[in-house]
Amino acid sequence: MATTESGLILRDGFARAATPAAKAGAAFVVIENPTDMPDRLLAASTDAAKRVELHTHSMTDSGVMRMLHLPEGFEIPAGGQLVLERGGHHVMMMGLTRGLADGDAVEVTFTFERAGPVTVTLPVDLQRGAHGG
């Protein structure tokens, strides 16, 4: 768990890839905002990937689920939370520079509009299903 100077709390984070040899992976975390001011997650970065984007899932008109890059990021409402989770909002790591083996760790820097950059170390958990599960 990490707490920013502005009061945001990052907890229950983990990273995963389909296999340790995969070229893409994702990071997930719960970001709580107990303050009375909204914040926005603008970006994420890690040296474990060549490119990192904030993504969400969206259903197409034909019923197919697609991932979408959201360059504007995600709002974290005052008194609320943002859950980055499998099948929803998440951090997409593309062009992995190393394998994400179960039990490893990866440092991810989250950049917020108000809180600024916050670096956390996330365990790699290839077994975890739904967030927190």
Image: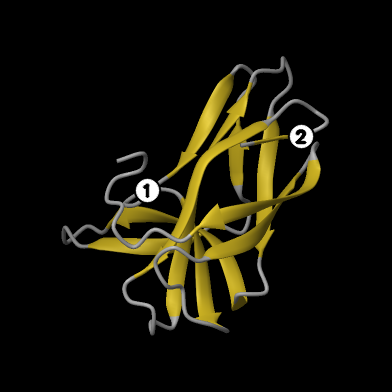
Q: Residue at x 44, y 83 (%)?
A: 23
Q: Which mark is residue 88?
A: 1
Q: Residue at x 32, y 72 (%)?
A: 18
Q: Residues within 10 Å of mark 1 (few under 14, many from 20)?
A: some
Q: As shown in the figure, which amino acid type bears the numbered disc 1?
A: Gly
Q: Point out residue 110 in the picture as x, y percentages from the top left corner.
A: 68, 52
Q: Point out residue 122 in the picture as x, y percentages from the top left corner.
A: 55, 54
* Closer mark to the observer between disc 2 and disc 1: 2
Query: Residue most toward the left?
Result: 63
Q: Residues within 10 Å of mark 2 (few under 14, many from 20)?
A: few
Q: Secondary structure at mark 1?
A: loop
Q: Secondary structure at mark 2?
A: loop
Q: Point out residue 40 in the picture as x, y percentages from the top left corner.
A: 68, 39
Q: As shown in the figure, which amino acid type bears the numbered disc 2?
A: Thr
Q: Would you identify the image quadrant in which residue 2 lies? A: top right
Looking at the image, is 116 positioned above or below residue 36?
below
Name the quarter where the C terminus is drawn.
top left
Residue beneath disc 2: 4
> Which badge, 2 or 1, comes first in the chain's sequence?
2
Q: Nearer the viewer, residue 2 or 62?
A: 2
Is residue 29 visible from the viewing direction of this image? Answer: no
Q: Nearer the viewer, residue 114 or 29?
A: 29
Q: Would you identify the image quadrant in which residue 57 lies? A: bottom left
Q: CA distance from mark 2 to mark 1?
A: 24 Å
Scheme of colours in the image? secondary structure
Q: Which mark is residue 42?
A: none
Name the quarter where the N terminus is drawn.
top right
Q: Residue at x 63, y 54 (%)?
A: 121
Q: Residue at x 64, y 59 (%)?
A: 108
Q: From the viewer's perspective, is 37 left or right of 76?
A: right
Q: Nearer the viewer, residue 51 or 102?
A: 102
Looking at the image, is 8 positioned above or below residue 71?
above
